[in-house]
Each structure stands twice: as C-alpha cells, then as structure tokens.
Amino acid sequence: MVTRGELRKLILFVLAGIFALSLPACSARKFKSGDGLKAPRGYRSEFFLKAAYAMGRLDLVDMEPDIPPELKVYSDVEYKKTDSLSLKLDIYRLKELTEPVPVVIFIHGGSWKSGRRSDYLPYLVDYALKGYVTITVSYRLSRVALFPAAVQDVFCAIRWVRDNAGEYGIDPERVALAGASAGAHLAMMAGYAAGDPLFNAGCNHESMVKVNAVVNFYGPVDLTVDFARESGPLKEFLGKSYHEAPDLYRKVSPFTYITPDDPPTLTFHGTIDSVVPVSQADSLDTWLNRAGVTHEYHRLKGWPHAMDIGKKVNEYCQHYMDIFLNRYL
C-alpha cells in the first residue's frame, strides 16, 4: 500500500522530470573555437537531471562497447614495476596502419583512490576507429601509495609510450593526454610540469615527457582552495591535511606549473558540477590566457560531473575533441 506521503513524493518527482525537460536549451561558452555546434540541453540542478534519467529521457553511453574486428588490442602491457605491483596499460589501434599515427593516452578518474583503466573504453574504441592509437593506463591509487606516486606513474607511462612507439605504430612526437576528474588532474600535471625532477623520478625509460595537447574533463586545478582543503579523498592522496602541509597542496596543483610553453589545452566543465566546482575551470581559463597558452574552454550550462556519460554531451565533446586533436597533433 502506497501512503499519501509516498504518493506525493512520486508526483513531485514526475513533475520535476517534466519541468526539467521543458527547460530551454543551454549552450556552452567557448573560447577560440572555430565551430558553432551548440551544447545539448542542460538542467537546473542534478535533481532534475536524475528525474529525466528516471523517466528514460536521458540516454547514456554504452560503457562496455564491443571491440570492432578492425581493431587490434594489446592488453595488460607492463610499463612499470614497483615493489608492490605491476603497472599496466592497454593499447588499441587499427589493424592496418600504413604509417605512424598520433597517440591519445587516457587517464581514468576516481578521486585518486578508485577507478579502472577500462573506464575509458568508449573513447578508446571511438578514437582508435578514427585513426589514432589509444592507450589507457593504470597508476598507483592512494590506498597503495601517496602523492607523488600517481603522477610519477603517469610520467613513466608517457616515457614508455615514446620509447616503444615504433612497435605499435605510434608517432612519438604527437602525444595527447586526456583525463576526467582526477585523471584530468594527472593529465594536466604531466602537461604542465613535464620537466619537474620529482615527477620524473623512479622511471628507467630513456625518453622524456613530451606532450603536444591536453584534454581536461572537469579536472581540479587549484587544490589550495576551500573545496579541496575539505576533500577527504585529496587528504588520503596527500597523507596530510591542508593545515599540516599547505605547501604540499600547492605542489599538487596544476596551476602552480603553468608557463607560456605549455601544451594547448581543451577543457569541458559543467556548471552544476558538485564534485569539482566549475570555478576551477574558470580559473584555469584565466591562468592559461594570462600565460598565453593556447586554450579552448567549453563551459556547459546545466551539466554535472561525469556529464560526458550522457550520449549527447559525449557527441558534443567528441566533436570538439576531433577538431582540437586534428589541429594540434
């Protein structure tokens, strides 16, 4: 038996979904974008978005797509061995490559404490079919090793890729990084702090970190501000609170390393992101502009964290990624 209170909640939930769907379409704020594709309709809040999803009005990306027969996959390739574990990566490429092609290395998110390299499978397949070699990497999570271990692992993965490029049809001089949330943080660290000795430690590969482009999906940039200071996962990643080690929170922040010679950066961030505030992307845009770094910023109104799981947002992001990667790789 449904109580009157439960029925009222159900009616309000359905009405919220209907209201959410009636919101006008919202566009992205774009800088230095040469195309006029509009962003898909956004939502007033995460509540309305969840209501739309519950009503079957929000389609999601297939997170476990089949591997097309024209792709070759190299799974569980070890790129680094530590005292505690073997770190591995997966490689996707067309079976028939006539010349070396650019590589896009995807770095998964998960608050530095969770996530799997297979989380990026939709992008890995899509961009391999578009002619790139795509790679996804594992790194030491915070429960295994504290900062700077994860950053060092990503640096080492990039160096491994450049050292072994010829074996997989990769052009080692055309390397892009893409990541979401904590993965975007690691991608920006590799893009902006490539020469830092601390992050290049613990890796035996000869090549140095060289990145031509960075794709940042809603990543944290300044970890000295209030939202970061109060973050449990960040404290677990660093092993200390902000009050114990404020300099450490600056050292882990990508904005610390921004210089005019940094790689072109493409950013996507939603305005109702409750995990990483959109103010992080706003600040990044300001800092990159001040430094004179080529940068494109898509500020999607009415979309939350992990927004590109939605089909329409994913299509929008891939559209601009295609343009960006074609331009800078």
Image (spheres, rainbow, N blue to C red):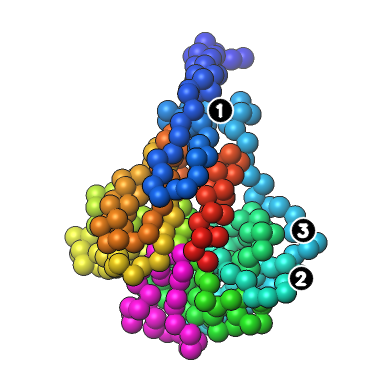
Q: Left or right of 328: which side holds 297?
A: left
Distance (Cα) linking label 2 and label 3: 13 Å
| First reached walking from the N terminus: tag 2 or tag 3 | 3
The relative height of residue 329 versus residue 59 in the rendered view (above or below) is: below
Label 1 vs 2, first from the N-terminus:
1
| Residue 240 visible here | no
Badge number at residue 99: none
User: In front here: 215 or 50?
Assistant: 215
Residue 90: image location, x then y, percent? 63, 70
Query: Magenta stretch?
Result: 186-213
In the image, residue 263 lies at what x, y percent?
A: 40, 66
Q: Earlier in the sequence, mark 1 or mark 3?
A: 1
Q: For mark 2, give the secondary structure.
A: loop
Q: On screen, 217 above or below 254? A: above
Classify mark 1: residues with Cα within 10 Å, few (<14), some (14-19) or many (20+). many
Q: Secondary structure at mark 1?
A: helix
What amino acid type is highlighted by mark number 1?
Ala
Q: How many marks?
A: 3
Nearer the viewer's eye, disc 2 or disc 3? Answer: 2
Residue at which label 2 appears: 96
Callout 3 amino acid: Pro
Q: Which residue is mark 1?
A: 52
Residue topped by disc 3: 68
| Residue at the spot 38% in from the left edge and 56% down from the top edge | 295
- Mark 2 neighbour density, 10 Å: few (under 14) some (14–19) many (20 or more): few
* Residue type at the position of mark 2: Glu
Alpha carbon separation for disc pair 1 and 2: 42 Å
User: Can residue 205 be found in the magenta stretch?
Assistant: yes
Question: What's the CA distance linking mark 1 and mark 3?
Answer: 31 Å
